[in-house]
Amino acid sequence: MRFVPKGYGGHRRSPDDVKRDGWQEQGLLAVAIDDHRLTWPERELVRQLGEKLYGQCSRDREVSQ
């Protein structure tokens, strides 16, 4: 007999499933700045929103140095 505590093992949701559920259930949006499904203006909007809310991205700091 094998016992697995709740939350360990079984089916693991994909990152996109977690993001979709977060949006639909809680109104949270998680977007990668380099998501290929977005156009350049959409990626730029995401980048600007991220900087306004949380400051400059560490990836951007590395590129500008």
Image: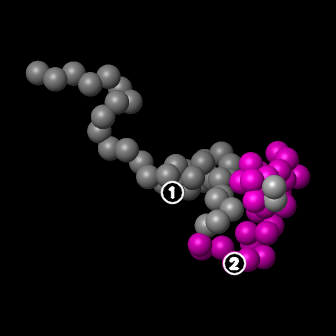
Secondary structure under tag 1 reads: helix
In the rendered view, would you say 14 is above or below 11? Answer: below
Image: magenta residue range: 36-63
Crowdedness near tag 2: few (<14), some (14–19) or many (≥20) residues, C-alpha within 10 Å = few
**CA separation, marks 1 and 2?**
18 Å
- Look at the image and tell me whether residue 27 can be seen: no
Q: Which residue is mark 1?
A: 16
The answer to whether residue 44 is left or right of residue 25 is: right
**Residue 31 in which image quadrant:** bottom right
Secondary structure under tag 2 reads: loop
Disc tally is 2
Q: Nearer the viewer, residue 32 or 9?
A: 32
Residue 15, how many percent across, how many down?
A: 49, 52
- Look at the image and tell me whether residue 44 can be seen: yes
- Give me the disc on residue 39: 2
Residue 59, how many percent across, how many down?
A: 71, 54
Q: Nearer the viewer, residue 28 or 65?
A: 65
The answer to whether residue 9 is left or right of residue 52 is: left
Crowdedness near tag 1: few (<14), some (14–19) or many (≥20) residues, C-alpha within 10 Å = few
